[in-house]
Image (cartoon, grey):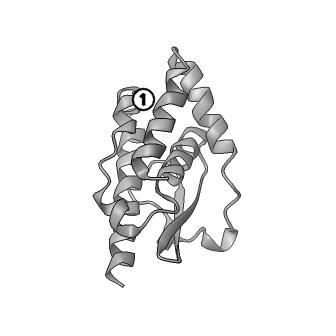
Amino acid sequence: MTIEEIEKEIIEEFTVYDDWMDKYAYLIEIGNSLPVMDEQHKTDDNLIKGCQSRVWFYPEMRDGKLYFTADSDAIITKGIAALLIRVFSGQQPEEIVRADLKFIEEIGLTQHLSPTRSNGLLSMLKQIKMYALAFSAQ
């Protein structure tokens, strides 16, 4: 599936909910379904800088595609990380670098996150793209 196709799926899933409390609950549910991250990957090198909560992203290249695992000590942030993993995991680094994410705005995430969570989201996106740049240069 392409990044754009995954984004469309996410947008459709979120349109089911009218109320933002329901969307937050769904985001938490998504975060709870995130596979457990291996403790050895929860290092300072994998910690996202610029996030108020602790968030770790671990990249791994397999067969020309980038895969991510993540974890967070905050439930909403973990849900956001899970959404980003869903969009980016299994994609080629070049596709990740070029991705112009529309789903974040379309589902209303940017308008409904606190400023600190918005900064955290931007920091996660920046780090994912940095990982993709680093892997595409190899």
Given the current orientation, which residue lies at the most extreme top position? 18
Residues packed near mark 1 inside 10 Å, few (<14), some (14 to 19) or many (20 plus): some
Image check: 42 left or right of 38? left
Q: Position of residue 58 (x, y in %)?
A: 54, 68
Would you place residue 42 above or below residue 72 in this image? Answer: below
Instruction: Tell me what residue is drawn at x 37 percent, y 40 percent.
Output: 118
The number of discs equals: 1
Would you place residue 96 above or below residue 72 in this image? Answer: below
Q: Circle 1 — which element?
A: loop
Q: In the depicted view, which residue is nearer to us: 99 or 117? A: 99
Instruction: Tell me what residue is drawn at x 35 percent, y 76 percent.
Output: 136
Q: Position of residue 99 (x, y in %)?
A: 32, 54
Name the residue type under label 1. Answer: Ile
Q: Position of residue 29 (x, y in %)?
A: 66, 36
Would you place residue 78 above or below residue 104 in this image? Answer: below
The quarter of the picture where residue 114 lies is top left
Q: The C terminus appears in which quarter of the rendering?
A: bottom left
Residue underneath mark 1: 107
The quarter of the picture where residue 93 lies is bottom left
Q: Position of residue 70 (x, y in %)?
A: 58, 58
Instruction: Tell me what residue is drawn at x 35 percent, y 27 percent.
Output: 111
